[in-house]
Image (cartoon, rainbow, N blue to C red):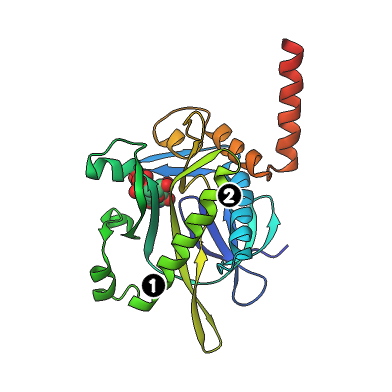
């Protein structure tokens, strides 16, 4: 096997050079960070689950016409993606007040918003990812007004679709973060959805009980972090076969105990 050329290492993922020009291998790690890396840890099995969950959600979004970087799954922790130039913005869509938003506006966590709210944060860890508006984006030329129109449409469409998809499996999509990239093919340049969509960057609450099934379990030491991620994968029907076996073994074990 040839050693692969590492391109970039982030907090939860690593990128390697892909087998064909214009492709990258996206590798999902078990590492987790929160509060701008002040809190660090690992969530055993997270990479495998996020790889599957993100693949599933990107494919479903692709089917409704939202272009994404996903090409195909390679193995339990890796997927082949299109190489893009990442736009340095974290695009957050919110349906319900939570996290930093609830704090910033002094509203109770869990309060539904009258309409979805889109927020942009500059992707810059050293600056602590500050909230920015369109004037900042245009003045610093991180993206053009046309780019932002495209991003807004794709983010809101993804929100409508994912809200329904998650509700169908008993999960409330509270908020989530997207990243977009520029794809250059020939003379054309277009913006596509990149990065990942997983419980690392979504707030997902059980629709009935309100139980958190996402990274807030890690952020706030709520315990059973991996179980939350696994439950999301299970409800979406994408639990890896090995994990299904674990669950079946676990169910058999608890039956014999009763
Ligand atoms: N988020 C993310 N990466 C970040 C910051 C936020 O993926 O660097 C996600 C987070 O998981 C949540 C949404 O974006 O689903 C909104 O997060 P918020 O702004 O409330 O920040 P937090 O409370 O997580 O600091």
Quadrant the N terminus occupies: bottom right
**SS class of the residue under badge 1?**
helix
Q: Provide residue 114's location: percent of width, then percent of height.
A: 34, 48
Q: Provide residue 159's location: percent of width, then percent of height.
A: 48, 55
Quadrant the C terminus occupies: top right
Image position of 164 with respect to 72: above or below: above
Q: Nearer the viewer, residue 163 or 20?
A: 163
Report the residue at 76% width, 33% height from top. Answer: 245
Report the residue at 46% width, 33% height from top. Answer: 217
Q: Which residue is mark 2?
A: 165
> Horizontally, is 172 left or right of 122 in the view?
right
> Horizontally, is 240 left or right of 65 in the view?
right
Q: Which residue is mark 1?
A: 149
Is residue 37 among what the camera can see? no
Is residue 153 among what the camera can see? yes
Q: In this figure, what is the number of numbered marks? A: 2
- How packed mark 1 is, by other alpha carbons closer than 10 Å (few <14, some 14-19, many 20 or more), is few
Report the residue at 26% width, 61% height from top. Answer: 132
Pointer 2 residue Cβ closer than 8 Å to ligand 1 = no
Which of the two labelled residues, at mark 2 and mark 1, occupies the earlier sequence position?
1
Q: Provide residue 5's location: percent of width, then percent of height.
A: 59, 66
**SS class of the residue under badge 2?**
helix
């Amino acid at each position: 096997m040839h050693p692969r050329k590492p391109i970039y290492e982030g907090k939860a993922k690593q990128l390697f050079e892909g087998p064909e020009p214009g492709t990258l291998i996206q590798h999902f790690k078990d590492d987790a960070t929160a509060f701008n890396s002040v809190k660090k840890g690992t969530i055993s099995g997270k990479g495998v689950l996020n790889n599957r969950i993100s693949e599933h959600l990107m494919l479903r979004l692709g089917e409704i016409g939202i272009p994404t970087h996903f090409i195909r799954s390679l193995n339990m922790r890796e997927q082949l993606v299109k190489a893009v130039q990442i736009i340095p913005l974290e695009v957050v869509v919110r349906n319900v007040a939570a996290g930093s938003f609830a704090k910033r506006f002094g509203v109770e966590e869990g309060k539904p918003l009258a309409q979805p709210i889109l927020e942009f944060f500059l992707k810059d860890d050293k600056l602590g990812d500050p909230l920015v508006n369109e004037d900042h984006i245009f003045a610093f030329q991180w993206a053009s007004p046309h780019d932002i129109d495209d991003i807004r449409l794709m983010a809101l469409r993804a929100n409508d679709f994912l809200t329904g998809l998650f509700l169908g499996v008993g999960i409330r999509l509270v908020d989530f973060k997207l990243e977009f990239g520029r794809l250059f093919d020939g003379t054309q340049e277009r913006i596509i959805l990149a990065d990942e969509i997983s419980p690392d960057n979504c707030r997902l609450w059980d629709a009935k009980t309100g139980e958190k099934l996402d990274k807030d379990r890690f952020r706030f030491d709520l315990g059973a972090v991996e179980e939350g991620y696994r439950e999301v994968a299970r409800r979406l029907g994408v639990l890896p076969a090995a994990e299904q076996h674990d669950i079946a073994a676990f169910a058999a074990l608890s039956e014999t105990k009763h």
